[in-house]
Amino acid sequence: MSIKTISSSEFDQLLFHHPALESLMVEQVEWFSNKSGNLFCAIAKGEGVAGWNYVILKRDKKGDLHIRKVMNNFFNLSAARVDLFLSMAEIEKTDCVKRGRADSWLPPVSARLAN
């Protein structure tokens, strides 16, 4: 999976569809997208010790964005970023399986293990 950093203004253009996210994602610090541009993500710092959180938005077949995942209570930026990237990979993997395509970055599964 290829992840690219995007600008805050690029992500902010998406938020007019989701005003509730503005209150959750108060102090955004990092923004990402996947290569195909159907996943958009932001990491934000909230209040408290475990105040780091993130959101993943996903485009549907019509191109409309929907909240796919929201996670909170991370103790630092690094922990939130790692969990975000793992979640993005899982979402892409699930989408590929639903479309009947195998991911090229995943090793093949032995027939014995698949049964």
Image (cartoon, helix red, strand yellow):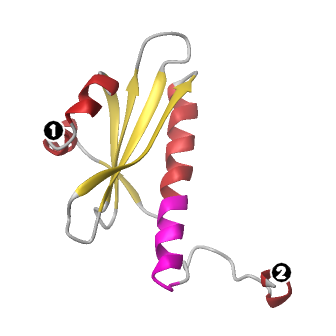
Q: Label 2 neighbourhood size at 10 Å, few (<14), some (14-19), many (20+)?
A: few
For the point 35% across and 35% down, which residue is it? Answer: 30
Residue 92 in the image: above or below residue 98: above
Q: Position of residue 70 (x, y in %)?
A: 44, 39
| Label disc, if present, on residue 9 of the rendered structure | 1
Q: Position of residue 52 (x, y in %)?
A: 48, 24
Q: Label 1 neighbourhood size at 10 Å, few (<14), some (14-19), many (20+)?
A: few
Q: Earlier in the sequence, mark 1 or mark 2?
A: 1
Q: Which residues are magenta?
A: 90-101
Q: Main secondary structure of the magenta part?
A: helix
The stretch drawn in magenta includes residue 95: yes
The residue that label 2 is drawn on is: 113
Using residue 30 as the reference point, say whether residue 14 is left or right of it.
left
- Tell which tag, 1 or 2, sits nearer the viewer: 2
Which of these two is toward me, 48 or 61? 61
For the point 43% across and 11% down, which residue is it? Answer: 47
Residue 68 in the image: above or below residue 79: below
Q: Position of residue 76 (x, y in %)?
A: 54, 23
The stretch drawn in magenta includes residue 20: no
Q: Secondary structure at mark 2?
A: helix
